[in-house]
Amino acid sequence: MIFCVEDDSGIRDLMIYTLNSSGFEAKGLESGKELFAALKTEKPQLIMLDIMLPGEDGIEILKRLRGTAVTAGIPIIMATARGTEYDKVIGLDLGADDYLAKPFGMMEMVSRVRAVLRRTESKENDQILQVGRLIMNLGEHTVLVDGKRIQLTLKEYELLKKFMGNLGRVFSRDQLLQGIWGDGYMGETRTVDVHIGTLRTKLGVCGDYIETIRGVGYRMEAQEGRE
């Protein structure tokens, strides 16, 4: 899925049509508010992000995306009508993967999308995390328990990824809340406990791999010799 954040409905519709016609799935969003709402339920392969947006502009949105663990790795292509060197440099310095100056051709856009995805996906493809009977494929964004695929929400997936990538490390609730939900989240640490509970339930026989460290937080240990 590719998110196209563009407030001009004509341009947005053309981008979505072109991407869908080129074999991608695309969703149109007209503001940062809509983008962050969509990110709560789905993690896209890539975000096309216009700089000139109503409310929060693209540069501020980019900062938020790169500053939150859940969204920090999503490839981002910036687009703007300004076409100034300053905007391009700022966007790339803040972590944008590429830049398109308006007006740009739709085929050029598709070419840039494919190039960025090739670069970024090559870093994750075939990366496998395994703990006992639990397997996470980072490239495919899948989780298997005894060979059976488990459906997780985005937050559950990111929690599990953090545990499996840091075996033996204890994370406090505050660390998990900040790392997964981001600095701007106003909820309580109880949110972490609720998500850990649902994650354990979905993992079934592997649920007890996530250990509660009383008075501290949670950790996952290697499972050699326990199966």
Image (cartoon, rainbow, N blue to C red):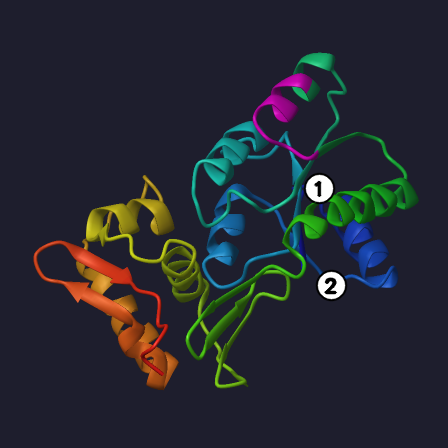
Real-space CA distance between mark 2 and mark 1, rounded to the nearest whole angstrom: 19 Å
Crowding at mark 1 (Cα within 10 Å: few <14, some 14-19, many 20+):
few
- Residue farthest along the front direction in this orientation: 225
Q: Which residue is drawn at 31% across and 78% down?
A: 207
State the extent of the magenta-drawn residues as a range: 89-97
Numbered mark located on residue 182 in the image: none
Residue 172 at x, y percent in the picture:
20, 51
Report the side of 156 relative to 127 (left or right): left
Q: Residue at x 38, y 79 (%)?
A: 203
148 relative to 140, above or below: below
Question: Which quarter shows the C terminus?
Answer: bottom left
Q: How many labels, in total? A: 2
Q: Which of marks 1 and 2 precedes in the sequence?
A: 1
From the image, tell me which residue sits under label 2: 25
Report the side of 43 relative to 220 (left or right): right
Q: Residue at x 74, y 44 (%)?
A: 119
Amino acid tagged 2: Glu
Question: Which quarter shows the N terminus?
Answer: bottom right
Say what secondary structure mark 2 lies in. loop
Numbered mark located on residue 8 in the image: 1
Residue 23 at x, y percent in the picture:
84, 64
Say what secondary structure mark 1 lies in. loop
The answer to whether the residues at label 2 and label 1 have Cβ atoms under 8 Å apart is no
Amino acid tagged 1: Asp
As for residue 93 lying within the magenta part, the answer is: yes
Crowding at mark 2 (Cα within 10 Å: few <14, some 14-19, many 20+):
some
Q: Front-most of 25 and 96?
A: 96
Residue 209 at x, y percent in the picture:
30, 73
